[in-house]
Each structure stands twice: as structure tokens, then as C-alpha cells.
Image (cartoon, helix red, strand yellow):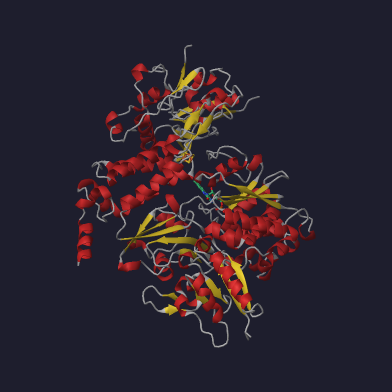
Amino acid sequence: MMDKVSFTIDGLEVVVDNGTSVLEAALRNNIYIPHLCYHPDLEARGACRLCIVEIGGGELVTSCRMPVESGMVVKTKSPKIEKIIRPVVELLIADHHASCASCPSSSHCELQKLMAHLRIDRRRVRRLRLPKVKAPLDTTNPCFDYDPNKCVLCGICLQTCESIHRVSALYYVGRGYTTRIAFYGDKSRCESCRECVTRCPVGALISRKT
Amino acid sequence: MIKKQYSLTVCQGTGCISGGAEDIFSSLEDEIDRLNLGEGIRIKRTGCHGFCQRGPLVVVDPETSSGLFYSKVAPGDVSDIIQSFLPGGKPVERLFYRDPASSKPIPNYHDIPFYRKQERIVLRNCGHIDPEDIDDYLATGGYQALRKALFEMTPEQIIAEVKQSGLRGLGGAGFPAGRKWEATFRAGGNEKYVICNADEGDPGAFQDRSVLEADPHSVLEGMVIAGYAVGARRGFIYVRAEYPLAVKRLRIAITQARDKGFLGRDILGSGFGFDIEIFRGAGAFVCGESTALVLSIEGKRGMPKPLPRPRTAEVGLWGKPTLLNNVKTFANIPLIIVRGSEWFASRGTETSKGTAIFSLTGKVANCGLIEVPMGTRLREIIFDIGGGVPGGKAFKAVQTGGPSGGCIPASLLDMPVDFDSLTAAGSMMGSGGMVVMDEDTCMVDVARYFLDFTQRESCGQCIPCRVGTKQMFSVLDDITTGQGRPEDIDLLLELGESVAGTSLCALGQTAPNPVLTTIRYFRDEYEAHIHEKRCPAGVCQALVSKTPSLSKREGEGDK
Ligand SMILES: Cc1cc2nc3c(=O)[nH]c(=O)nc-3n(C[C@H](O)[C@H](O)[C@H](O)COP(=O)(O)O)c2cc1C
Ligand code: SF4
Ligand code: FES
């Protein structure tokens, strides 16, 4: 017997299974909350910070890691959320060296979806400093390329490798702005399952057609 | 030959050693041997006195009211120091500390303003005992707290005492120590751990290093008591990779403590067993954050864990309940146990008990490591203990709390220094860094400097911190090089609020502080840089030719 809990999200009364996260409950009820690092197959890491919602008296939490509690009142939109989340998305766009027109992920890209949802204003993005150098493509993996300029470091590829394919061939390297995912080429334990490529929410992992 | 018995202490802290203190110690020893004065003069090595700027330091009879303080001692002074003990000998006046304002010599250790206004609890033994000799620690009452805890107190009583003392963690966040101890005690299971955080990654901070180098046993004793209280049998000290001397002294201390039965399977015959291992840090600033530190000991990449999550006290190292405290938090414990929580809580403010420790640096006459009761006014710290700003310059601001702290202006100098007042002023206690800035400091440049540090040290996992701190740094860099845009101040405020409000861990949450406080208190300097392309303090190179204050200074030099 699965316990059910009911809660309110954006004024809508919803009943879900106990243990469901606020983000999952929202998505299941066709309420979109911005997110990049959440993937239904994986444990929520709370890394991208985009899924922040307001609960109860105004506490801000990442909805992907917040389990629904009975009677909880959730707001996915509020001036408070808007004020802190919009700049994060703008930062990401300013940093995302990409032209959507030529990107193979265009039309199924989570970042595009996010931008449309938030109605990103390009003028505001232009206030930001753009990165001066483009990082080179990492082509060391035998079956796919990695474009660090598009990577949002959601960590989904890493987590997939670790918990879906159970290989752990991918690593974080570096610190700060230059943090990257490393694929370690020939020495890699990668078994070319491409599970990570499938789950990349943007176009940072590109299958090579050999 | 010598009537009286003298004791001569030679500081062997990292600061004094780099000034040649090891040679001075051996020369003094040789000279004592040569003149066959070993009976009358007892010489010993100590850890840091905190006044590294005046080192190498030699103190005669530090425990007595007539103790003499010799500063900036060089090998050439050794023979004169020894001669001074012989009949008819006089103190070596040229080595006396001189008051920076009046140039008056102050011979007595305890009269020096730098020390007079301090209250040393955590630093109680620093500069007084030989850190490599457990007997010296025992002579000051060392390990009595452990005896009392093991034989006269239950774990519950110890936890109650720590709670009542009001002690708050000195690693930065100021979380009540007693509550953490209680949570670890209550957590189930019979495998638990105690971790001492000695990562100290803040640039310029050296409090934890000094305590470990000067008084390692006080930390070990605090940890064993903690182990007994929470039910742990294993402890780790996570020491910053760059602290070889601290590691060396800790190793010696651990071996000596084991030999004397203060560590091991059956401590002092009580049946309680506890041992401590040293873990050398991975070298990243973020590894000082508690969850990242735990991952680092487990051999994984040090990346903070997001909320909501179980507390480290419940699920910590290898998934077991873990008590994690800072070096200074542990060093407080023996005194709280021996003298009681009331004694401890009698100093400090309503919400911050005990003492605060700062590394006082920057444009201040007396730089060094200081300890004052919580609630001491900033003005007393900077002007009485620190001796004010040298060179007749005006005080401009003080930056507290390490790279993520804020800049506090002159108008707030009468503010009491404690956890909550500092936070209210937009800064924080943090690691206890305290950098004094004078009129020649450019506040935009200061903000740029600190953001440069944090943006490099971001672990990279969350977007606002990784990309946001970098962006804020780029904007500040543009402003200081004359490329600021009219909308930049608003942009920085907006980004700052967003990065602080969305980041996963305290690194990102506090990183904007230096920017937000300098805009709050020194907005005019930002405006001068952006709108007039002028650096009022004459620091920013790209704007220097347009800076009247610098040309004025050059003019003065011509006279
Ligand atoms: C980026 C970052 C770095 C930190 N570095 C240290 C450190 O070097 N030493 C330390 O004791 N605490 C550090 N902390 C605080 C720890 O997370 C933790 O709060 C503290 O060690 C707990 O001990 P306490 O309760 O005795 O203060 C850091 C926190 C953050 C977010
Ligand atoms: S705030 Fe910065 S340091 Fe902390 S988890 Fe996020 S990226 Fe890492
Ligand atoms: S989806 Fe919740 S933090 Fe990324």
C-alpha cells in the first residue's frame, strides 16, 4: 500500500505518492519548473540550482531534492524566485558558446526550453561579459565528442556512467570556471554504451558517426 | 655564578623560524654551554606568540610580571642576551619593543599594548610551552580535563556543560557546539567519528596553524573528550597540505599522548578507547567545507553536498555519525571542562560567548594573531591592540572573515565584534581574518582581489557560483581597467543577490560579500571608476594618469 500525500502547487491541489519530490510532482501535473541537472532516471543532485521554489512562508528550496509533504504550499513563480533565478539563466546563456541553428540538439534542448519559458531578454544578457576564448573540443573518447563550450556541468553524464552503466569512466577535472568533464581517451574505462550521450540535456556530447 | 633562575623562551613558530629562530635557539644554547650557565638559565622552544611581525622573538621569564620581551633578535644579539644574566649585566635595550607612536621602549612583555588588551584562552599556552614536550603541557594542567571527563562525568554531563557554555564553532559558521555534540551523541550506531577541521584555506589566516604548532595537545585533549562524549573511538585531523610544521608537531604530540596513555585502547584505565590519525588535505579551499571534507577523506572529489540532506552529525564519514569541529573549537574544550561553563560564558556577548581570534594584518602597526573577548569593539582591536594605521594615514576600512567577508567602514568602528554584529554589517566572523585598509586602498580593487580568489576556488558544481563569481570578477576587472559601464553597479548588485541566494554551499552564498559591502559603503569609488575613469586611491594602474591623488603624492615627493 503506497501512501499518498496531498499538497498545493501554484494554487492547484495535487495528490502524489509519498516520497515524490516537488519537482517530479510538478512535472507530472504539467507544471514546468526550470531544471537542468534533474533526470528521471537518476538521483537528484541539486547542482544546477534552477529548480528553486518557494514553500510555506517563503523558504526557498531546490524542488528536485525536496520531498512533498502533506499540506505543503508551493509556489513555482514569485518575484523572489524571479529575481534570483533569471540572472543564473542569463549567466548560463552568456557563457554558452553556441549557435542553436547548427546544434544537433536544437529542438530537444533543455536550455532552449528554459529560455522560452523564462522569455529571456537578450538585452539583459548583453550586459554580461562574454568569455573571450573558446575551449577546444575534447575528441579523446572513441565514440563521441565533448564540447565544453556547451556543457552546463549538470553532471548527468557522470551520474549516468556511475549509476546506470556502473562504469564510472567520467570525472570532474579542474576548479572554478574551468571545471570540465574528462573522458580520458584511450585510458578510459568507457565501454561506448552512449547512455550519457542520450541523457545530455544540451548538445555538449555529440555522437560521432564512424 | 647566576643567583637567580631564569627561563628563556625562543619562539619556533613558522614566522619566527623563517626569520632564523632555529639558529638563534642553537646559538643561545651554545653560548649557555660555553659559559657553563646551564644551571641558571633554562632555555626552551615555544610555539607562536602571535606577534610574528616582530620576530624572531625571545622572551625572558614570560610567566613573571617582570618578563622581558626581545624582538627582532638576530644571531649577533645572542651574546649580549646571555651577558645580561651575568652579575652586573643589563637588559639588551636595543631589542626592546618600541611603541610605534611614541618610540618609547616597552621592556616588559605584559605591558606591550598588543598583549595587554588580549584575553588568551584558546591561545593560552601559545608561546609559553614547548609544543614538542608533553610534560610542559602537563605542567600547565594539561589532560586534567580528560581525567575529569572520564572519571567524574557522564557523556550527558559533558554535553550539557558544552551546551551551557554557549561555545559556538570557530570554523566560520558559528554553529552552537553543544547542539552538534548532542546530535552526534543521539545518532544511533556504535561506529562514530570525530573530525578536527584544520584545512584553513583562507589566504592570510594562520590561527589554526599557530594553535597546532604551539599547543597541539589542547586540540588532542579536546578531541578525546569529544570522542568520549559522543561515543566515537576514532578521530581524524584534516590538516592543510601546506602545514608541514603543524603535521610534524601533531605527530610528536600524538606519539607522546599514546605513550602516556591519553590516547589508545584503554585511556588511563577507564576502559574508553580513542585514537587519532592525521589526514593531509587535498589542497583545495572548498575542502574545508564540512561535507566536502568528509568526501575528501573518503578519497573522493571534495564537492559540497546540497540541502536538504542529513546532517554530518547523523550521516558523516563513511555514512556514520560524525562530529566535525574546528581546531579552535576543540582547543576551548579542556578549559570549559576544568573551569566550568559559567566561567567560560562570563565573557562575550549575549549570543556569542567566549573569545574571538583574529589574524590582524594589512595597514596596521602591529600585525599578528590576537584573541579578545567576543563583543570587543573593532576600534579597540585596530587602534589599541593593533596600534592604529602606520605612517599617519587615515583608516578606511577593515575586511573581516576571509575572502568571503565584507569590508566595514570607519563609521562602524564602534561596533562590537561577534558573530551576529559582523553578519549584520554584511561581513562575517568566518576564519577570523582581519585586514586593515588605509586611505591608499582602492575598494573596487579589494573586491576584485577577493572575487578572483573565490571564483578560482569554486568547486564548479553549481552554476551560480561557477559562472556567477567569474562574471562578477570580469565586471570588476573591467571597472578597474577603465572599461566599466554605467549599468555595472546595478548589474553587480543583481548578480550578487542571485549568486548569494541560489548557490549550493556557503562558498558561493558568501562570495559576493566583498562586492556587496564595498558598493554599500564605498559606492562613490565605484562611480568615480565608472563615470570619471578615475581611481580615487590611485591604485588602479590603467586609471592612474587621471588620478589627482597620485600626482599630488608625486608632487610631495619632489619637495
Ligand atoms: C568554502 C568553505 C571553506 C571552509 N573552510 C573551513 C576551514 O578551513 N576550517 C574550518 O574549520 N571550517 C571551514 N569551513 C566551515 C566548515 O564547513 C564547518 O562549518 C566547520 O568546520 C565546523 O566546525 P565548527 O562548528 O567548530 O566551526 C568552511 C566552509 C566553507 C563553506
Ligand atoms: S557554491 Fe561554489 S563551491 Fe559551493 S557547491 Fe556551488 S560551485 Fe561548489
Ligand atoms: S534540477 Fe534541481 S538543482 Fe538542478
- Considering every residue shown, the one lying at the far bottom of the view is B88
Residue at left 66%, top 68%?
A: B136
Q: Nearer the viewer, residue B58 or A203?
A: B58
Q: Which quadrant is the N terminus of chain A positioned in?
A: top right
Residue at the (22%, 58%) spot, across then down: B549
Residue located farthest toward the top when viewing the structure as drawn: A210
Residue B164 visible somewhere in the drawing: no
Any part of residue B490 in sight: yes
**Residue A57: x %, y % from top left:** 45, 41
Report x, y in % for residue A141: 51, 21
Residue B439 in picture, x, y percent from top left: 30, 60
* Image vertical order of residue A77 relative to residue B390, above or below: above
Rendered residue at 19%/51% (across/down)? B546
Could you say which is closer to the camera, residue A7 or residue B387?
B387
Where B248 falls versus B91 (above or below)?
A: above
Picture quadrant of residue B298:
top right
Q: Is residue B495 left or right of residue A33?
A: left
Residue B228 percent coordinates (x, y): 71, 55
**Is B53 located above or below residue A53 in the figure?**
below
